[in-house]
Image (cartoon, rainbow, N blue to C red):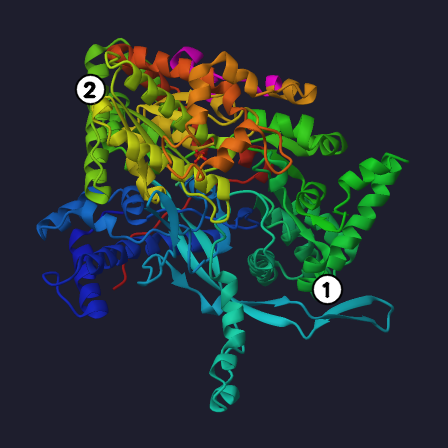
Amino acid sequence: MEFDKEKFKNILMTRLRQQYGKDIAIATRHDIYDAVASACMNTVVDKWIATRRTYEKEPGMRRVCYFSAEFLMGRSLGNNLINLEIKEAVEDILKGFHLNLNVIEDTEPEPGLGNGGLGRLAACFLDSLATLDYPARGYGIRYEYGMFEQRIENGFQVEYPDRWLTHRDPWEIKRSDLAVTVHFGGKIVYRKTPDGQERFNLEDTEAVTATPFDIPVVGYGTDTVGMLRLWEASSPDGFNLQLFNDMQYTRAVEKQISAENISRVLYPNDSGPSGKALRLKQQYFFSSASLQDLVHGFVSEYGTDFSRFSDCNVIQLNDTHPVVAIPELMRILVDEYRVSWDMAWSIVVKTFAYTNHTILAEALEKWPIDIFQGLLPRIYQIVEEINRRFLIELREKYPGDYQKHNAMSIIADGMVHMARLAIHSCFSVNGVAELHTELLKTRELKDWAELYPKKFNNKTNGITQRRWLLSANPLLADFITKRIGPGWIKDLTKLKELEKYLDDEASLRELLEIKQENKRRLTEYLKVTQNEFLDPDSIFDVQVKRLHEYKRQLLNILHIMYLYNKLIADPSYNPYPRTFIFGAKSASGYRRAKAIIKLINTVAEHVNNDRRVRGKLRVVFIENYRVSVAEKIFPAADVSEQISTAGKEASGTSNMKFMVNGAITLGTLDGANIEIVQEAGVENEFIFGLKTDEILKIQTENSYHPQEYFSKNPELAKVVEQLVDGTYDPSRQLFKELYDSLVFGVEGQRPDVYYILADFNAYCEAHEKIEAEYNDRIHWAKMMLKNIANSGKFSSDRTIEEYVRDIWKLKKVPVTVKQKTDE
Ligand SMILES: *Cc1c(COP(=O)(O)O)cnc(C)c1O
């Protein structure tokens, strides 16, 4: 369909008049953003309606429903303009009004409805699904407050609420007509029908209304527009006028507030347990609402013959957060539609598939029985029945092996184990990188892989090149398109063709110049936003990701302290100037992670104010790391720090974003780093450190004694002592706990559980190698191009095609918008 500039302009003006009572001369930036987004939405809705119509006409269509507690979508305007292929046209229109599209884009509030990798993966998947014309829906929660805003005050992380909904969101459409009710608590009422069938009903429940908000997901270069459906909680009988008239104002809105709290806030917990009952409430809330939505849709099309349900729907569970959907589907089928248990179970086991995201044992979700049963009495009863039947199977298969029965029982030790429920009930269980899946099968979930070998499979994560290259790095995107055409935008493996430029010096120099320009842009951005002054001629060495001990930001900052000591000790030492860039949020209750943030900022302040190292070393902590900032960082990075303890990072996806943007990986053989090395060649990355099996060996032999590294390496000993000797902190208390955890071990833990001291030397050597190789600019540019050219595997398009082939079994359903004759 031809883009109609005049019409776009008209919608924009009308919107400004009707929503804000203004013309373009007096409109604020936000008004203009909202009006541009609304005009853009008009085009989107044409495609959206066409998509819905096409799907309605498609007999027996199968779709995937991606259930996720997090969708870290980032901003929409820029991405939607690109995917609609109207960005330049809209840029021109705005230029006509002396407006800069980039500035308008930057006023969009950012929906940060996710913590990190898991939520961002969900967002990349939706982009790929729409682009590849697969029928799909994302289902989640419309949190009123997303990821907190992080400010650094005095070097400490301070959290502020993220009020992303202060203004209306022009991308969402409220669908009150599709609201459903979700029930919590209550009593189970049992009866037998005259013909002897059992019936269970819940009475005296807390009823909560779930109202969906639909957000379009615009595919690139296609008319398909997918959908993200997010549920908002409210009370059906919220406001009590009686109480209000009795002047009991707080009690009058109590129910309302209690219900609304369910979708109030995203838990800022990246992984690891959270004992919050409200969190379980959130999980059941969106799982139940989404299933009711799917079942209503199915019944209105096919009636109550549920034998076809799993032909039409496959549900992918993004980690264990939505696993309570499994017993909920049993409840809906058995209690509400009177399907027999066996029939219902046969449907459930064909419908659900589960993605595991972590090997950290402490992060496997489990709920105390009393909380679970109190909140969801009927669901608990169903889980008990699923488990009772499962245990019969287990006892038959492993007679007398009580240890195993207990280790696999869904209910055990006073807890409901969500991962066990998922693995038993789902037809597919996948890890997110080759190493991760292998470790699940041979270690963490070994018993399960032996019981259900066919369920386990790997789906290495990916990222969408539309956001992370085409949109985030326009200079590099043009460089690529000029040489190999635009095919890579929909097929990233085409980047391989860039290898023919590996010996073309002009191209290599251009590549370096693009990196340089992106570094200048990041420098400018940090000057304006944080009053930080970087040197774009230095090496930009970047570690951005959630702050977690296993990700080892501590290793990075300890090396910086070491380098600083070396520069001070020897003023004639003149290495290539380096800028170390960090960005990371810590979970609000994660004390050690917060201490590491404070340490990074303390060292940064100290180093950056020391004239002796000026021009040689600089440390920067970027505040409030999030998708929009990430889009500015990846294009400007020279070195990508991926330094987790081997065996701990399930996949990582920022490693992939760095790679497509031409940064070289400094990493351990962990997660998808291993596959990055396989694709680009080990000579084009900087790999260091203990490997998974070496760590396992040390662990099983109990032979790790970190103190040995101090006697072998006095520089390391000095750096660790500096945590507590007053060099950085006169009180000597701030980093004491960090120090103790490294040297002695605290709270019954062994010292240095993440093997920072063991890997320190290898890490320093890798940095020296980087410094040497960076000097040879053409050599470095070749490594960059090698990485870019071989990043094709890491497109989420490839990941999605694998899910489709092995798990979802979807068919593409292309959509075409007819030329409209309306208005
Ligand atoms: C990609 C991304 C992540 C994931 O980073 P990892 O290094 O893979 O943990 C986290 N946060 C944001 C904003 C991202 O874009």
Q: Nearer the viewer, residue 781 or 591?
A: 591
Q: Is residue 261 visible?
A: yes
The verdict on residue 687 being magenta is: yes
Q: Nearer the viewer, residue 806 or 167?
A: 167
Instruction: Name the spot of residue 17 as percent of width and height, x first.
Output: 18, 68
Q: What segment is highlighted magenta in the picture? A: 675-694
- The residue at the point 48 percent across, 87 percent down is 244
**Image quadrant of residue 448?**
top right
Three-letter code, disc 1: Asp
The residue tagged 1 is: 335
The residue tagged 2 is: 510
- The residue at the point 24 percent across, 48 percent down is 106
Q: Earlier in the sequence, mark 1 or mark 2?
A: 1
Picture quarter with ligand 1: top left
- Are the two marked residues, 1 and 2, in contact with CB atoms closer than 8 angstroms? no
Q: Is residue 692 left or right of residue 441?
A: left
- The residue at the point 50 percent across, 54 percent down is 140
Residue at the right extreme, as displayed: 400
Q: Examine the rendered structure and indicate whether residue 746 appears above or below residue 87.
A: above
Instruction: Name the spot of residue 716 as percent of width and height, x first.
Output: 45, 19
Element marked by disc 1: helix
Respond yes or no on whether mark 2 lies under 8 Å from ligand 1.
no
Q: Within 10 Å of the Cα at label 1, are there few (<14), some (14-19), or many (20+) other Cα atoms?
A: some
Instruction: Name the spot of residue 282 as percent of width and height, x first.
Output: 56, 58
Q: Nearer the viewer, mark 1 or mark 2?
A: 2
Q: Is residue 90 left or right of residue 656?
A: left
Q: Mostly what secondary structure, the magenta segment?
A: helix
